[in-house]
Image: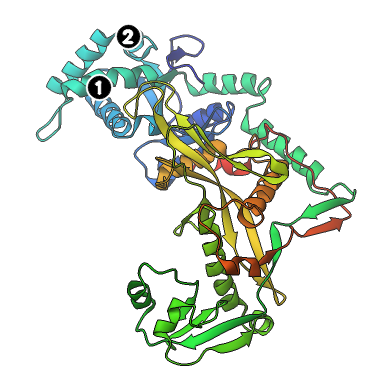
Amino acid sequence: MNSVTIHFLYGRRESLTGKSEAYKKSVRAYLESFGYSQITDSSVEGTFEDMLFCNPTIAPGKKFLVEVKAEDLSLSSCKFAKELTRYFRLWHAKEPNERFNFHLFVQAVKKPDEWEAIFSENNQSLAVRRWCNWYNTKCLKENDIPLSDQEIVDIVKFFSESTVTVANSQRLETAVCEKESKSALSISKMAQSLLNIVEKRRAPTMKKSNLVMNILPISLPPHYYTCQSSAESKTDIYEGLKGKLIPPFIWRTKSRLMMSFMRFDQESPLTEYAAGLETTLKTRDFQSENPPLCSELVNVHLRRIIWNRGVYRDSKAGIFYFPMLDKSKTKRIVIGPNKKPRWVVRKLVHLEDSQYGKKGEPNFFFHRAIELETPTYWGNSYVELTPRKYYTFDGETAIDGETRKKLDAKFRNPQFDRCKTRLGLMRLWRYVLFESKEYAIKPEKWFDNFRFGHFIKEVVDWSPKVIDRDQTRLWDFGGK
């Protein structure tokens, strides 16, 4: 299905049999035999296109818009020409990397030579221009927008990248039978293959193994401190103490209470807003009696430690990452466990000139990032580290929305996401954040009051079965 040309299955002659929905059914079966999976159908969703497909095996993330014509079709049909122009304008309105593939199925065509001149892979621009001029002069009604000169230039590319398949229902069904007898890409064979894999793997291997969790215990200072504040809000405190090193604290809006693991004594700038004496409380009681608030207090202190490591935080995504401050470099390296160098940012460049940039210029930056939480379980505090992928335009500014989703789809596959890789990244981040002696900003004295353990490990009587590197994930069939 990679070919972009016009195909006459079993020849050019055609007898018009079958109705539109019956023909669509044959087309659907034909595409499924190539591994395509249907997402929408105009008869159900009422969409402009007849059917929308995806094919995660051939083109992950790509959409295929399918138009079906159960008739003997002519390029001189104004009705069809308007539909074709609408498809082109939908295609043309999208960014080049987001454009769909257009596929037309038709039972028969009139004047096949004209179709080949327009839709072949090396189509004739003169033939396309003649068709466009005919469309502009013969098909448009009042208020209809003609094809502009630039659109006429671009529609040549649209036609050359589109696929036209000419075949009646019988010939499609014959092709399906022949394809399914040989192809491993057909939906039925892929489903059976996945079912067999699931059957084999639904029960773990009964062999002892070490289950490593992504949480590690943290030892906190034995006491925390509270103090009433004279400020109206937390913002007032930060504005009033601008330029001073403010200890981490959390603010209780209703009670105007400040809470911190640091004392509200003369060494603390926060005493300027103290409305009374500090209260000393036991951390152990705090962990048991109010786990969520304890987790919040731990979190603000760890964020200060991490910031002094030179690690940025995306508060919206809850992700921590190293920025690429020196844009001239292709990688940013940190020293990990066992003194091994590990990259945490990579610069990916344009491989060729395009509207987005010239060859060799930065395309985007790929960060090995971490999502960090500070849960309190069973009266104890923990750090939960989950490796994440993060993308920026310039090494600092986040890429978000659809572009980020597409980058995630590229790297979210078994080739990259392996258990050993994930475990290695967990250990790297634990070392970099909590064990390394390297700081971008001088560490504060209280940092040593927080002690970090190792990832919790449990010996279990079973071992999981790891998927193959080339195995398609279930979510790749979603199409969205």
The amino acid type of the residue labelled 2 equals: Ala
**Mark 2 or 1 closer to N-term?**
1
Q: Name the one closer to the observer, 425 or 51.
A: 425
Relative horizontal placement of residue 473, taking residue 84 as reference (left or right): right
Closer-to-camera residue (270/368):
270
Residue at x 25% of width, y 24% of height: 81
Disc 1 secondary structure class: loop
Res 296 → quadrant: bottom right
Amino acid type indicated by mark 1: Ser
Mark 2 or 1: in front is 2
Asked whether the viewer can see residue 74, the reply is no
Secondary structure under tag 2 reads: helix
Q: In this view, does 285 lie above or below 86?
A: below
Which residue is denoted by mark 2 in the rendering?
Answer: 117
Q: How far apart are labels 2 and 1 at the CA level?
A: 17 Å
Viewed as shown, does residue 127 lie left or right of 58? Answer: left
Q: Position of residue 264 (x, y in %)?
A: 50, 82
Most foreground residue, 43 or 431: 431
Residue at 63% across, 40% down: 473
* Residue 195: percent from left, percent from top: 73, 40
* Dot label at residue 77: 1
